[in-house]
DNA sequence: TAGATTTGACCACT
DNA sequence: AGTGGTCAAATCTA
């Protein structure tokens, strides 16, 4: 906390995050029923803009010039922590027409860590996109092979998005997923539905998909974000965090995370990061939070889903802003609880949808 | 039969 | 030379 406060850039970010918090509060109010979807959309858009700015500040080194490796990577010694992996730079992958790549040129790339509640038998492959596996390789120093996937529509639509999926050494239920490139393909299944204009249909479906992602019982972590210095102190640091893994909120189980001083700050923060990162790569964002939804889906109806999803989105933002601004895990958690208590009273109309595409896109 | 997966080989990069 | 990413033939599956 103090290290951030002592940082001029940190103050700026805090200011921005405070702004976000205020916007989220407004959004909460409108979600209560009085606000129009358009207004909610506008607010979400604003939240996104400010969030992106904040992330930009963080990335540009306003906090700490040293890029810290992911906690899990350090703890587990995986993710090529021992070698200069491509994961460690945010440069990107080229996709040459020929076989090889490996140059450090453009293209988006994100690494996320997903915990599949489905266990080792259920790799987090359902992220809203169709992937085709084109290779698998044993990676030096890793216990599990890395799978290589490309967008199914690569040939038909020239979509060059790819991803790599690899189980972490320490926990086979946790996967590191690295996305390369952006999806330029259109979701046929989505676009075909309801005879609506493709854009609108796709938009809602995509937004819903993202909401599912957010509430699917896992949390994602974006590799490449510099961890706020304060989080690395006092035992609650980035390095101390375990891979993000939440029990599904829609499964009816109350998250026991309140007792965990690390869980509150880590989860929402990473969700925020995911959202922000999505901004950088709209298409890829669809894939940001990958996981198996079947278990959660089996346990609840659509209404329950939306309720939980909306809470997740809003609470993630609130928690993220609060946590980051204060760097006090416990108070932050309390705050989230307080904010959520208001949301808990809401009854969401199953037919009510909020277009938050602009928030993620 | 079309599409997806597996797997050995090729090749670029460090 | 070692390693990682991709290709493409063989195989599998719905």
Image (cartoon, coloured by chain):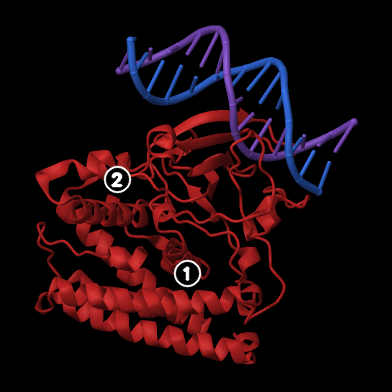
Chain colours: A red, B blue, C purple
Label 2: which residue? A296
List x then y, in percent, for residue A299. Answer: 24, 44
The residue at which mark 1 appears reads as A269
Camera-side residue of A182 and A33? A182
Residue A260 as seen in the image, left or right of residue A78: left
Left or right of A83 in this view: A134: left
Q: Is residue A270 above or below residue A157?
A: below
Question: Does the rendering let one see residue A332?
Answer: no
Please give the name of the residue rendered at 61% of the width and 67% of the height, measured from the top-left corner.
Answer: A238
In this figure, what is the number of numbered marks?
2
Quadrant hosting residue A230: bottom right
The spot of residue A78 in percent (x, y) is 69, 47
Which secondary structure, mark 2?
Answer: helix
Is residue A13 positioned above or below A342 on the image? Answer: below
Where, quadrant-wise, is the C terminus of chain A in this rendering?
A: bottom left
- Image height of A320 relative to A204, above or below: below
> Label 1: few (<14), some or many (≥20) within 10 Å?
many
CB atoms of marks 1 and 2 within 8 Å: no
Chain for disc number 2? A
Where in the figure is residue A320, as x and y percent of width and height? 44, 74
| Residue sitting nearer the eye, A211 or A158 | A158
């Amino acid at each position: 906390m103090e290290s951030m406060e002592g940082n001029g850039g940190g103050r700026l970010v805090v200011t921005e995050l405070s702004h976000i918090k205020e916007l989220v509060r407004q959004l909460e109010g409108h979600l209560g029923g009085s606000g129009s979807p358009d207004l909610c959309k506008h607010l979400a858009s604003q939240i996104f803009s400010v969030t992106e700015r904040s992330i930009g500040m963080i990335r540009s080194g306003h906090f700490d010039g040293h890029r810290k490796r992911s906690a899990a990577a350090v703890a587990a010694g995986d993710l090529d922590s021992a070698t200069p992996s491509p994961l460690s730079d945010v440069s990107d992958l080229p996709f040459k027409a020929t076989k090889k790549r490996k140059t450090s040129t453009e293209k988006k790339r994100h690494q996320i860590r997903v915990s599949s509640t489905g266990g080792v038998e259920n790799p987090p492959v359902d992220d809203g996109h169709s992937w085709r596996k084109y290779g698998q390789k044993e990676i030096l120093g890793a216990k599990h092979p890395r799978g290589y996937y490309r967008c199914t529509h690569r040939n038909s639509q020239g979509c060059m998005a790819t991803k790599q999926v690899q189980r972490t050494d320490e926990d086979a239920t946790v996967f590191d997923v690295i996305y390369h490139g952006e999806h330029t393909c259109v979701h046929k299944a989505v676009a075909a539905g309801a005879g609506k204009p493709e854009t609108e249909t796709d938009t809602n479906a995509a937004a819903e998909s993202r909401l599912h992602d957010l509430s699917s019982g896992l949390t994602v972590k974006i590799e490449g974000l510099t961890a706020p210095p304060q989080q690395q102190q006092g035992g609650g640091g980035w390095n101390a965090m375990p891979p993000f893994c939440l029990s599904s909120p829609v499964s009816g189980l109350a998250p026991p995370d309140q007792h965990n001083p690390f869980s509150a700050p880590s989860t929402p923060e990473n969700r925020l990061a995911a959202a922000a990162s999505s901004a950088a790569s709209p298409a890829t964002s669809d894939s940001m939070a990958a996981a198996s939804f079947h278990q959660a889906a089996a346990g609840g109806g659509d209404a329950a889903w939306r309720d939980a999803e909306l809470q997740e989105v809003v609470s993630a933002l609130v928690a993220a802003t609060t946590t980051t601004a204060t760097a006090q895990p416990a108070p932050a958690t309390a705050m989230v609880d307080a904010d959520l208590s208001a949301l808990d009273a809401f009854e969401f109309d199953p037919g009510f949808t909020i277009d938050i595409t602009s928030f993620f896109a």
